[in-house]
Structure formats: C-alpha cells, structure tokens
Amino acid sequence: MEYFHSIKDKDIFDTPFAEPDHYIDRPTVKGLVFDVDNKIAFIWHPVEKYGLFPGGGVEQGEDLENAFVRECKEEIGCDIKILSKIGVAIQYRAKDARRYETHFYTATVIGEKGLPTTTQEDELGVETRWMTLEELDAQLQEQVGFKSKDWYQRQFNSRTHFAALKKYKGEIN
C-alpha cells in the first residue's frame, strides 16, 4: 500500500523512544467533514488546547467506511455521506509499540447537525468547532510546532492530520 505520510518517533523527538521488535496494528479512520457552509468539523480539546479531525479506531469485523460513518455520529453527532478517500497515512509509535494505519476521507453532513453520542472518557468535554480550510491550516501548523513527549499521541496525530490537510489541498502527492 502506498502512504502519503509516514512518521516515527525519530521524525519528531530529539531523543526518540527505542524501536520495538514488533508493532501491534491499529487500523483507524479520520476525515474532513464539510457542512453546508463548507466548514470542516474539528474536534477541539479545550483543556489541552488542540484538535483533530473526527474519526477513530476500526472495530473488529467493521469495514473502513462504516467505521468512519459511526465515528462521525459518535464524535460530532452528524450523519455523513463519504465523498472520497484522501489516502492512507502510517504512524509507528515506539512508546506503545503500535502501528496506526489511518485512512483519511472527505465527507459531507447529511441533514441537521446533532449532538455527539460518545461515551469514551477521553472524548468527554470536547467540542466540535466548524472551521474554514485556512483556520484549520493555521491551527494544525501551530500544533505541529509543539514538541513534548508529555503529549506523545498529540505529536503524531497533529502531524498526520496536517499532512492529510495538505494532501487534500493538493500540496503533497
């Protein structure tokens, strides 16, 4: 499979975690979800002051597109229609020995915007911000500039989401 983005600890940190002997695969789905005003859903964590596109892990036996539809309903409270696939990015996270293969999509909201239904503890208290491409670009660029092992997952996700946005905009192949 061809990836538009690949990232490891050594690409982020001056003193990376040691590479494990084996990675555990974790397929995930994420995407740019557009509303009728052409704004894009961004899941904002107000305490940590960072955000990501909606999406998450693919459950056992679930196909990728159904997983993305489910995750959008849970995280942003919206029914969606998938428009296209942006591509696939891969993360090798040495700290937790996980290999994340993330499939990115574009989608549009169908009907009215609702309320998130998630019950995941790490998603409680987040809010959906609807942002322009320019606002997303600036926010993700700011997040990529932050380097700290205290926010390990955030380092990978911010960079991968920024790469997906650039891929969508045609700035990378």
Image: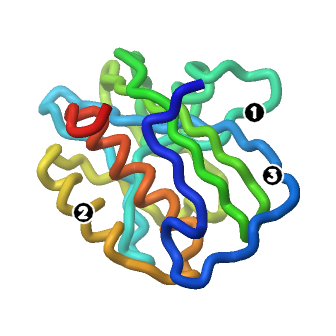
Residue tagged by mark 1?
59
| Mark 2 → mark 3, Cα distance in angstroms | 30 Å
Residue at screen point 51% across, 40% down: 89
Q: From the viewer's perspective, is the residue at label 3 or at label 1 nearer?
A: 3
Q: Quadrant of residue 95?
A: bottom right
Q: Position of residue 4 (x, y in %)?
A: 43, 36
- In front of the other: 18 or 158: 18
Q: Which of marks 2 and 3 is nearer the N terminus?
A: 3
Q: In which quarter of the image is the N terminus?
A: top right
Q: Earlier in the sequence, mark 1 or mark 2?
A: 1
Q: Quadrant of the C terminus?
A: top left
Q: Where is residue 51 in the image (x, y as percent from the top left)?
A: 38, 61
Residue tagged by mark 3?
23
Residue 139 tag number:
2
The amino acid sitting under disc 1 is Glu
Secondary structure at numbered mark 2: helix
- Establish if 52 lies above or below 5: below
The amino acid sitting under disc 2 is Gln
Q: Which residue lies furthest to the right in this view?
A: 21
| Mark 3 → mark 1, Cα distance in angstroms | 18 Å
